[in-house]
Image (spheres, helix red, strand yellow):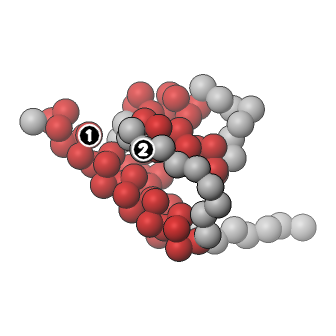
Amino acid sequence: MTTIQYFNQSVIELSEEVSKHPPLRELILAHPEDNTFESKLGRIAAYCGLEIDGYFDDDAVNLLCAKLISKLRERRTSIIH
């Protein structure tokens, strides 16, 4: 049986932004044994200097993704300048 999983636009945008940060991609790929979405969010948050803990519903995940996208874009543009 095939399962289709819906991803919110913020999750897709976060994935696209992560692809523009090679050190972060390497950090995520360095842990194939722990490849859950939650673990990836935790690594991205740590890379951005954010501490997260607790339960996140869908709305909170979307807000977190938006915050992480913003932080990653700041890091990327600060490298360019």
> Of discs 1 and 2, which sits in the foreground?
2
Q: Is residue 81 left or right of residue 40?
A: left
Q: Residue at point 60% right, 63% down?
A: 56
Estimate the x, y position of residue 32 in percent, counting from the top left: 69, 32
Q: Which residue is mark 1?
A: 75
Instruction: Assign the C terminus to one quadrant of the image.
Output: top left
Provide the secondary structure element on which disc 2 rests.
Answer: loop
Decide: few, some or many residues near mark 2? Use Cα within 10 Å; few <14, some 14-19, many ≥20.
some
Decide: few, some or many residues near mark 1? Use Cα within 10 Å; few <14, some 14-19, many ≥20.
few
Q: Which residue is mark 2?
A: 50
Please determine whether, in this image, residue 23 is positioned above or below residue 58.
above
Q: Residue at point 83% right, 67% down?
A: 2
| Front residue of 46 and 1 | 46
| Front residue of 48 and 2 | 48
Q: Residue at point 44% right, 66% down?
A: 63
- Tell me where residue 22 sits by quadrant: top left
Estimate the x, y position of residue 3 in percent, counting from the top left: 79, 68
- Specify which label sits upstream in the sequence, 1 or 2: 2
Estimate the x, y position of residue 76 in percent, counting from the top left: 25, 40
Is the C-beta separation of discs 1 and 2 under 8 Å? no
Please determine whether, in this image, residue 74 is positioned above or below residue 62.
above
User: On residue 17, which mark appears?
Assistant: none
Name the amino acid type tagged 1. Arg
Estimate the x, y position of residue 20 in percent, counting from the top left: 35, 41
